[in-house]
Image (cartoon, coloured by chain):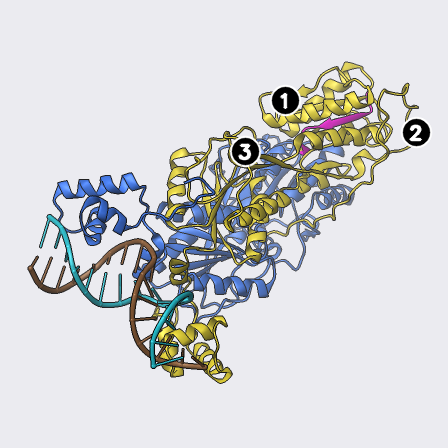
Chain colours: A blue, B yellow, C cyan, D brown
Amino acid sequence: MRQGGRRKAATVADVAVRAGVSPGTVSKALNGRGQLRPETRQRVLAAAEELGFSTNLLARSLLEGRTYTVGVLTSDSFGRFTIPVMLGVEDTLGAGQISVLLCDGRDDRIREGHYLHTLLARRVDGIIVTGRGSDPRPSLGQDLPIPVIYVLAQSEDPRDRSLIHADREGAERAVKHLFSTGRRRIAHVTGPQHHLATQRRIEGATAAFSAVGQEMVLGEPLMGEWSERWGREAASILVRSGKPFDGVFCGSDQIARGLLDGLRESGHKVPDEVGVVGFDNWEVMAEAARPPLTTIDLNLHELGRVAATELLDAMNGKALESGVRSVPCRLVVRESSESRGWFPPAPAAAATPVAPAERPEMLPGHETEPLP
Amino acid sequence: MRQGGRRKAATVADVAVRAGVSPGTVSKALNGRGQLRPETRQRVLAAAEELGFSTNLLARSLLEGRTYTVGVLTSDSFGRFTIPVMLGVEDTLGAGQISVLLCDGRDDRIREGHYLHTLLARRVDGIIVTGRGSDPRPSLGQDLPIPVIYVLAQSEDPRDRSLIHADREGAERAVKHLFSTGRRRIAHVTGPQHHLATQRRIEGATAAFSAVGQEMVLGEPLMGEWSERWGREAASILVRSGKPFDGVFCGSDQIARGLLDGLRESGHKVPDEVGVVGFDNWEVMAEAARPPLTTIDLNLHELGRVAATELLDAMNGKALESGVRSVPCRLVVRESSESRGWFPPAPAAAATPVAPAERPEMLPGHETEPLP
DNA sequence: GTGAAAGCGCTAACAG
DNA sequence: CTGTTAGCGCTTTCAC
């Protein structure tokens, strides 16, 4: 049966004939159900083998009313953030024999609606919606016959189940880490003001400052775009401000990398004079930075894993909880924040004591991906 | 029908009852087949609408023997190169109402075999195999009942159909582009010797040198790893060699970016004194480079599109061709190779004349992807 | 222990 | 024009 000459696949009936039994018996033998004489079972298995029999899952699904399939639907296209989530989902689901149908919404509501229709017609057992997290997205609605989980891009409807990474806590952790290495004069350079992520990270950073009774250098975050260019520019702004600073928390790894370049080129030593922490743990960025960048890992793979796990439970009848669940971020310590021990003494004791030095959870370094 | 109270979906029979007709008639009305009185059709459509009817594609597929589904199977995990391919596939297939099942092989042959089994049991209409292109991969075999196309990672078996990007021609084009901007003393810095990609790019580059009767600076390519670090190191090697050079073709954008940093920091002006061309058009890299990097775009999305198109034909009965087809790369001109017109006059006319200045095909710049 | 029959939801073929 | 029937491939009673 070469590619040209497609032959009809063998059915249970075919196997039955060859084994000299009935279709029902074949089914039992193949699925290890019922009481069969071992010898009969062997005969059936042999016949199936010889015919290259492969169960037609369509037929089984039709009967069972389950397809062991879930749809992953992106509102925007699959990008740097959604892909690790999707892989986490696929990974977890694949272990449970569940397949993933891919639907790329491309920021087009019409297209998305069309995909939703297709998924329902294909009778998927559940749907995971993902996309940019900059802002909440419209709900697919409450009247779907299957469970839906929103990941990264949370649903506008609080009755839906949404999973996001803990931006706020991550940012707080980043800043506390800088404090814990002895730095005191810390600035925050981040993305566009209107992004939800920007706001959440500012909140987290602010909380960390309050906790130790310090003020942000320049009094407020420097907001710009998520780019290396902006990071370089911010470095220049900081330097020219004349205000002393010994730490910078950046809202993204790209910004951090630009900032690192800017600092190096204006003669500031990292981490000796300034500690820098980024956000995202975009490994190619963080590892190629000079020096390698300490940053917050979004745990996107884990986010996908959790989403898949919750969805699996829901598919098995357990009611889905409502509202937003946030999955913790991880601090990944690299060189850019190393403490060198010569910092000025800590300022007057703050109301809340500085968090003790953290046990950094190192991520294993990934090899650079080979070229195709 | 909230998420908890899953109700059985309406069937053609339900619609039939409600519309006061038979199931057969419902089918015709819904699919626009056969001769129906317009009024009847309307009644059926209304009933379907009211019941929220959605065709059960499983049942249809079972009957039709086609599922309008293809599997995309990676040998390694989905990475920087395979993802654009997969998106190209999904894009093309989605337009034809075909869904994509995702299978992440993770470099594990057992796992891959398991996925293949599942795909066949689900009766997909075709399979696209993808993965790292560093070396050919084992064939899935010739005895599959459905067409298979290998993309990026070509099959070891020449009877299979493989699609790859035109590495060799891309490299040749890159070097010719440097020549066309007036440069003559060009070096080649690239990846590990044992990679097929490295070899193909060296071949292409060599061809371009031969065409204009020039020698590669240092006489041979500098081979290292696919990293920025190696790019920086190579810059230093080149500079310290004392040999004059005015152009460098890098085997990857990462190498190129490191090289650009190295050159800048050792006081060499790009593009004024040295022109640099990369490979991959990894946009975040190429655009963030200083200056923005001229490079070769692998056309991965197009590769996916072509693969999907060939697969569609094959699924419709057209026999798949055998062997490797290579899809052209594109030159993307940015600042790093700009001609400044003050170069030394061209050397003694070569046997083959220098290619005339190329019409650079600019790609639209992509915005930096917003954070989640 | 094993076989026969019914049915999952749909559509194509043939009656009426 | 519309209804009836059969069957896609499988599993699951329920007889034997």
B323 vs A27, left or right, is: right
Q: Nearer the viewer, residue A191 or B295?
A: B295
Q: Residue B235 at x, y = what percent?
A: 73, 23
Do circles 3 and 2 both sit on a common chain? yes
* Residue at 80 percent of width and 32 percent of height: B177
Question: Where residue A308 sits: x, y (%)?
Answer: 41, 52
Q: Which corner quadrant holds the N terminus of chain B?
A: bottom left
- SS for callout 1: loop
Residue type of the residue flagged with mark 3: Gln
Q: Which residue bears the numbered disc 3?
A: B154
Q: Are the residues at dot 3 and dot 1 in contact (C-beta closer than 8 Å)?
A: no
Q: Are marks 2 and 1 on the same chain?
A: yes
- Which residue is the site of mark 2? B342
Read off the magenta span.
B245-253
Structural distance between the alpha carbons of marks 3 and 2:
44 Å
Is residue C12 shown left or right of residue B227? left
Residue A303 vertical placement versus B105 (above, below): below
Taking A290 as reference, is B40 left or right? left
Q: Is residue B103 above or below residue C3?
A: above
**Is residue B251 covered in magenta?**
yes
Is disc 3 in the same subunit as disc 1?
yes
- Disc number lying in front (3 or 1): 3
Assess whether residue A237 is covered by the magenta stretch.
Answer: no
Q: Earlier in the sequence, mark 3 or mark 1?
A: 3
Q: Chain of mark 1?
A: B
- Residue B224: assigned label: 1
Amino acid type, label 1: Gly
Chain of the residue displaying label 3: B
